[in-house]
Image (cartoon, rainbow, N blue to C red):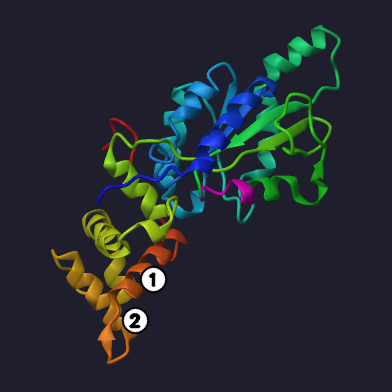
Amino acid sequence: MHFQWYPGHMTKAKRMMQENIKLIDLVIELVDARIPISSRNPDIDELGKNKARLVLLNKADLAEDKWNDAWAEYFKAKGYSVVKVNSKKGGGIKSIQGVIREACKEKIERDRKRGILNRPVRAMVVGIPNVGKSTFINALAGKACAKTGNKPGVTKGKQWIRLNKQVELLDTPGILWPKFEDQAVGLRLAFIGSMKDEILNTEELAAELIKFLGTYYPDVLPEKYAVEPDEDPYVVLHQIAKNRNCVVRGNELNTEKAAMLLLDDFRNGRLGRLTLEYPEGVC
């Protein structure tokens, strides 16, 4: 399978981010805790090179704890502030505002020395599609969320979200990058749903996921779908279709439906806590 998805709206979104970065003190980058490297847009490092940085290992409840801890240490060693979060259930959210201000303490101190005491920290929230930015912002803002209106120099129509007098957020659309140098990155992004399923062969994608799980988590599929392990992932996919009654007219097995069932179960954590990639030097 070949993976690439970079529609025109992503080019526009990237331009908007470049135009607004001068107003920003901190870049908050959400990554998927199951694939923390593959879910990082490499363009973000260039965009935020002179800014304070905070990496959020989002969907941490879907990944293994031991690997979440290992990834947190990995990013801290590279100079990032790091928080493990579960935006859907609110895990880790309460600590975020304190971490934001700690990450920007040098900027806050510079402002204080210049007599600027009430200027809020401004943070840009970035991440790939389906990494959970909107859920995170809603969890962080809660009912206290208020629009602060257009800011000078901000692309017309863009709204800031004021958390309180101390922190304002600028949300951005989820964007990928023009070319995946490693197609394995594209595969992992497809697994978590960061590309439209309509442009993918979902049966091939499910077969690749079956191969991965058979190697690293061999008990998952037998326990979830009562299937027998097999070296041919399509044999396993047929078993899933049969055992979950995925059929079409004429009682023929519908492997496409079974593929989407498997992918949906994985994406939503119904296969258990799974990590798909590991820090350098660990594995």
Examine the structure image and report whether residue 150 is included in the region drawn in magenta: no
Which residue is denoted by mark 2 in the rendering? 244
Which residue shows up at 32% across the image and 72% down it? 256
Q: Position of residue 259 (x, y in %)?
A: 33, 68
Callout 1 secondary element: helix
Rate crowding at label 1 as few (under 14), some (14 to 19) or many (20 or more) other CA atoms within 10 Å. Answer: some
Label 1 is placed on what type of residue? Leu
Report how many numbered discs are placed on residues in the image.
Answer: 2
What mark, if any, has residue 87 been given in the picture?
Answer: none
Q: In this image, 78 relative to 164: left or right?
A: left
Q: Residue furthest front?
A: 8
Which residue shows up at 23% across the image and 77% down it? 239
Which residue shows up at 60% across the image and 50% down it? 87
Occupied quadrant, residue 252: bottom left
Mark nearer the N terminus (2 vs 1): 2
The reply to whether the C-beta atoms of the residues labelled 2 and 1 are less than 8 Å apart is yes
Quick check: can you spot residue 106?
yes
**Near-viewer residue (198 or 188):** 198
Q: Position of residue 7 (x, y in %)?
A: 46, 44
Occupied quadrant, residue 101: top right
**Near-viewer residue (178 or 31):** 178
**Near-viewer residue (9 or 48):** 9
Which residue shows up at 38% across the image and 71% down it? 261
Report the span colored magenta: 130-135
Q: Is residue 252 above or below residue 49?
A: below
Q: Position of residue 279 (x, y in %)?
A: 34, 35
Q: CA distance from mark 2 to mark 1?
A: 9 Å
Q: Residue furthest left?
A: 231
What mark, if any, has residue 261 been given in the picture?
Answer: 1
Label 2 is placed on what type of residue? Arg
Callout 2 secondary element: loop
Which quadrant is the C terminus positioned in? top left
